Image (cartoon, helix red, strand yellow):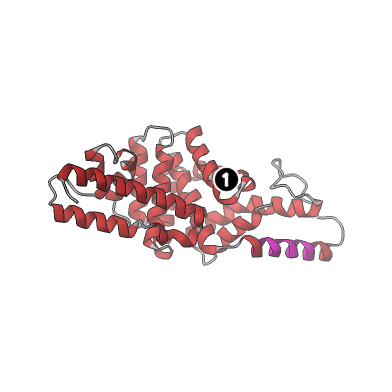
Amino acid sequence: MAIGKWIGGLLGFASGGVLGALAGFALGSLFDSGIDAVNSGQHSSFDGDRQGRGYGGDHGQSQRFRSNSYQRQYNSFYNEERNSFLFSLLVLASYIIKADGKVMHSEMEFVRKFLRSNFGESAVVQGQEILYKLFEKQKEIGWEEYRTVIQDSGRQIASSMPYEQRLQLLHFLAMIAQADGIVHPSEVSSLKEVAQAMEIPVSEIDAMLNLRDASSNLDAAYKVMGVSPSATDAEVKAAYRKQALQNHPDRVASLGEDIRKAAEKKFQEINAAKETIWKARGLS
């Protein structure tokens, strides 16, 4: 049972704010399901029909058992920084996925793979449930109101998360938008809204969306560097140094080896963009 991992995400925003409110809403049903599983002696992630709320037996003894069980999970899985990053990703992903008005299978599958590689199979089910709860909230309050919620979430993230981690978070969102092979203009617009809320230059979106082509496309390589083809050699070199410094994998190492490896892949793509430009300019 992986509920302790999501409790860690919730506790990461225990100081309040819109993310804390969203965590309470999205995690409530999972927490209840976890209690049900403990009471019934089950060890599955959760019961999909969410039935069986009765405790049974001696309430005091049952309560102590539940408390001890969750404490063990908490001690085993808790990493506030990592879980806060993951929960932030799910909140913002719920906005990007629905930006074009539909939930694409390829985008959801990207999220599933991310959850599976980070937290294991049980977290895939629970992560999906959190996303569905967020979609439910989005439908309940309407798109425009949800946009305000996302902007407030982005500002809260900006105030509590290091810049380099925010860059990696935004990169994952860009990869979600690219998952179906077509990045809709509404997705680009939503990505830029999120970037602004997290206090990241919107030019980073163009850079991220061109990473895949930068090894073979000179125009894409310049967009990755955030400079125009008319930039001087000195300006291009300065732009590369800035990108290399901000996106070095060690900057996100505290989030876990798997996230560091994802950052390493991005770092390699930035270096491929550099090589494309250096070759075109005859630089060494």
Q: Which residue lies furthest to the right in this view?
A: 57
Q: Classify 109 as above or below 40.
A: above
Q: Classify 54 as above or below 99.
A: below
Residue at horizontal 36 percent and vertical 44 percent from the top: 190
Give residue 136's position: percent from left, percent from top.
55, 42
Q: Classify 258 as above or below 80.
A: above
Give residue 212's position: percent from left, percent from top.
34, 40
Q: Along the horizontal axis of the image, is 7 left or right of 210?
A: right
Magenta range is 63-74
Q: Along the horizontal axis of the image, is 1 left or right of 168?
A: right
Give residue 166's position: percent from left, percent from top.
40, 57
| Residue 103 appears in view | no
In the rendered structure, does residue 146 fall within the stretch colored magenta? no
Question: To which residue does mark 1 refer?
Answer: 116
Give residue 48's position: percent from left, percent from top.
69, 41
Q: Which residue lies furthest to the front in this view?
A: 284
Residue at horizontal 36 percent and vertical 48 percent from the top: 268
Q: Classify 9 as above or below 225.
A: below
Residue at horizontal 38 percent and vertical 59 percent from the top: 164
| Residue 58 appears in view | yes
Res 69 → quadrant: bottom right
In this view, the residue in front, 275 or 36, is 275
